[in-house]
Image (spheres, rainbow, N blue to C red):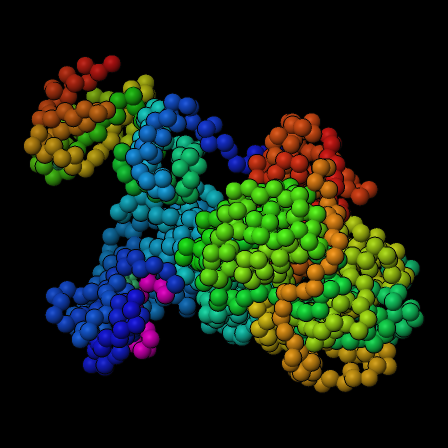
Amino acid sequence: MTDKLVTIEVNGQELQAEAGIMLIEATDAAGINIPRFCYHKKLSVSANCRMCLVEVEKVPKPLPACATPVSDGMKVYTRSPKALAAQKGTMEFLLINHPLDCPICDQGGECELQDVAIGYGRDVSRYSEGKRVVADKNIGPLIATDMTRCIHCTRCVRFGEEIAGIREMGATGRGEHMVIGTYIEKSVDSELSGNIIDLCPVGALTSKPFRFNARAWELTQVEAIAPHDSLGSNLNLHLRDNKVMRVHPKDNESINETWISDRDRFSYEGLYSSDRLTSPMVKKGGEWKEVSWEMALEMAAASLKEIGDGDQIGTLLAPTSTLEELFLAQKLMRGLGCNNIDSRLRQGDFRMDATQNSVHWLGSSLSDMDQMQTVFVVGGNIRKEQPILAHRLRKAAVNGAKLHYLNPIQIDLNHRGDQDVCTPGEMAGRLAAVAKAAGVKASGGGASLLGAAKVDESAKQTAANLKAADGALVMLGAMAQAHPDYALLHTLAAALAEATGAQLSILPTSANSVGAQLAGAVPHLQAGGTAAERAGLDTLRMLKMPRKGYLLLGVEPGRDFWNGSLSMSALQSADMVVAISAFRSPELEACADIMLPMAIFTETSGTYVNAEGRWQQSRGVVRPQGESRPGWKILRVLGNLTDQPGFDYIDSQQIHDELHKLCESSTLDNKQAEPQNLEPLLSADVLLRGGDTPLYACDPLVRRATALQQTQDAGSDTIRLHPQEAARLGLDGSDTALVKQNGNQIDLPLQLDERIPQGCVWISTGLARTSTLGQPFGEVTVEKA
Amino acid sequence: MTVTVKDKTELFSPQICAEIDRWIAKYPAEWKQSAVMGALMIVQDENGGWLTTELMDRVADYLDMPPIAVYEVATFYSMYELKPVGKHKICVCTNVSCMTNKSDLIVEHLEKKLGISFGEVTEDGRFSMKEVECLGACGGAPMMQIGKQYYENLTPEIVDAILEGLE
Ligand code: SF4
Ligand code: FES
Ligand code: FES
């Protein structure tokens, strides 16, 4: 496309447009409406619905505006008799097979077909013949289908091919018998699948959880920020009667474009889970009793003070909390002399904290992601960690970027890319090989590995692609961060990035992972993101050296931790655990002594700092449930009750402003002084567990979203292993096996999977049963049950 | 135990694999999917003239394409069968030229003789009937195709003779 401008005339109005763009883009930009069904600005042009026909001077037949490039001097009429006749004719044909069942259709009131029919159709139908009917298939728990309503625009099909990167919907049959669907009864499994609900211009694809719950005109729309992954996708919430009825994307070209992940779309269901904590409770003689707020807060403050030595307290904060909550929690605890504060609950190694004094981040802006020429992902399954980010990486790949992955499991890519799969114990060595190929000398933290590394073709290729690229990233994903040798991976990745001129990217795992560092919700940084005066214990050490008391914010023992069983034992052995939480779970009730009900996402105002360091604020738009209160208010009162100065906030904006000022000179930087003498902790020669945190197991809210929990991506409590590994372990033909890790053991179903490297068994974390085991990467034994 | 990810060479017999590979070799390496039509034909012939979903899935795995893309091809072209067919698949053209030359009499005759209509298979599994559009043999209308053979200028008597001659 050139930058040349051409002049066209639409309905007598002169317009300037970039040469080569389609007419509909020019009229859309000028606010001139042309009806359409198949055209969508983010999808390829298919020009199959013919709704956008317009009259162009000197052309005998009407032309589709979505597939007609503008040319200089073109004169267009969108409302001339000829254009209107063409539009009316198209409309009539489109309605021939449409059931016109608007009264029972969820799309009613927000249906493009309805709107366009009213604007451009006839008022009576002349069609009295039979209509075709399409049998529906169940395509999973998220999307309801009524394919008789489909008008064959193929937006959903093109979405699969062009955006999601996996073709699931298709057009089978032909002519009158053409049907859009999955052909077989099969769930649509893309982590972005919900977007086809928005794309479908009619009521053929609608939201299953929302089905028959409300009419579009009963809903009020308010904005919000998605609270799960580190993108901070912009949302439109649709509310009725103080309740979130559904979630839609809000366009933001520099973050989520016009899409959202299924996690952001359907997690709202978790808000209405039956185990919401709705009143303050204290445990007396093993029994939970509801108490007044006043009493609960006084008891919480008193018991925190009672521990006396701040160092005997551990503060564990959910990285999905708001910035204000994180900031106040650390302010409260540091004020009590407690420096043991962490929000990196799933990180496996903290050896680099000592030399880190800056805020880790994505290393690039989100919009630059699609422009990268080489990306080397170490320990990351980005699609199943941060779907919208993966979409940007996919765009880069489609544009010709080289993507390389180094993972302890073969992942399902939706784009071209090279995968190097090895056991968790070999990862650091493989990374060292790439670094060595790039010319990194054996010294510093990774010296021994670099010395021993064998450079093979694939390592050379990765290094060469990183070097050759104008715009390259070495990205450490969630599996790298959960690795017991993360410090080593980090050191090697940093050296590799340095040697190749690539950016080092540390993919923030949660909605406020960057925010938590800025807020001082980590042991080595204080508010403002600078080195803490006195560093405290990290998550792992807080659990390995159990403290007398703990403060938990939005955290679920067991499921939210790197080492589930360790978190349970440490918290259960403590004298006093104060939990500020939106939910109650059996695990929390087993550990906590006081539970304070907290308002969450949509019920409280707050800020999220996304992966690229962008601050975004969300308002509280529905009333908190039961007696729950915004976290910042709870923490403010605790500040007051523990006699601390500086806790007189009137609203959360003040907290935001205070922190914002502290952060004025802070920078996001992944560089750090290199720690010395890092030796690998994970042995390469024993049977190792590998484990990811499934897409819908990552935080308490999404774990309670019922529809999401019925999907593939919810993960399963199973042992996955290579058939040959199963044979070696004598598990041929068994359906279950006994797995033992750090003295814990459970029976789990077996699943043979050639994507798992030999020498490794795959057991995800964050799930109901697997979280009773230990860390995702570590020694295990598996034997016949 | 469930198993994910299959070894490609286990998808079909070595002979079928070799035949499909011949089709794959006709296209540039990155356009392997172009062999889908050939592959479906080979697999269909091997399976007694029709395709199961499972077979289509195997073709998809073999050619590294999404299953739905294979279903699209198989449902679009009329030469693929998605239900069992007879040993002899009788395709009768009922398009314009054949119709004006009384293809309806041919259809009627076949229906009476075999006791089946379009889309059905005789009980003994020997014959099935299928209605097709113009097969490009209008000069010999009315016509039908059985297996790979065209039969033209049909009359009920000729049809009888043809059917008699088949095993
Ligand atoms: S289901 Fe909806 S989006 Fe898909 S082709 Fe039909 S009308 Fe278009
Ligand atoms: S919008 Fe132009 S043909 Fe469908
Ligand atoms: S119409 Fe029958 S062969 Fe052409």
> Viewer-proximal residue, A146 or B74?
B74
Residue B68 at what x, y percent from top left?
40, 43
> Viewer-proximal residue, A376 or A302?
A376
**Viewport quadrant of the C terminus of chain A:** top right
Residue A625 at what x, y percent from top left?
68, 70
Position of A111 with respect to A220 (left or right) is left
Q: Quadrant of residue A343?
A: bottom right
Residue A279 visible, this angle: no
> Viewer-proximal residue, A499 or A707?
A499
Identified at 85% across, 74% down, the residue is A336
Identified at 86% across, 73% down, the residue is A337
Position of A579 with respect to A141 (left or right) is right
Q: Quadrant of residue A38?
A: bottom left
Magenta: main secondary structure:
loop
Residue A119 at what x, y percent from top left?
29, 72
Is A490 located above or below residue A71 in the figure?
Answer: above
Q: Quadrant of residue A304?
A: bottom right
Q: Indicate yes or no whether the magenta region holds residue A557.
A: no
The magenta-colored residue range is A28-41
Q: Indicate yes or no whether the magenta region holds residue A34.
A: yes
**Viewport quadrant of the N terminus of chain A:** bottom left
Identified at 37% across, 26% down, the residue is B18
Identified at 36% across, 64% down, the residue is A40
> Viewer-proximal residue, A94 or A724?
A724
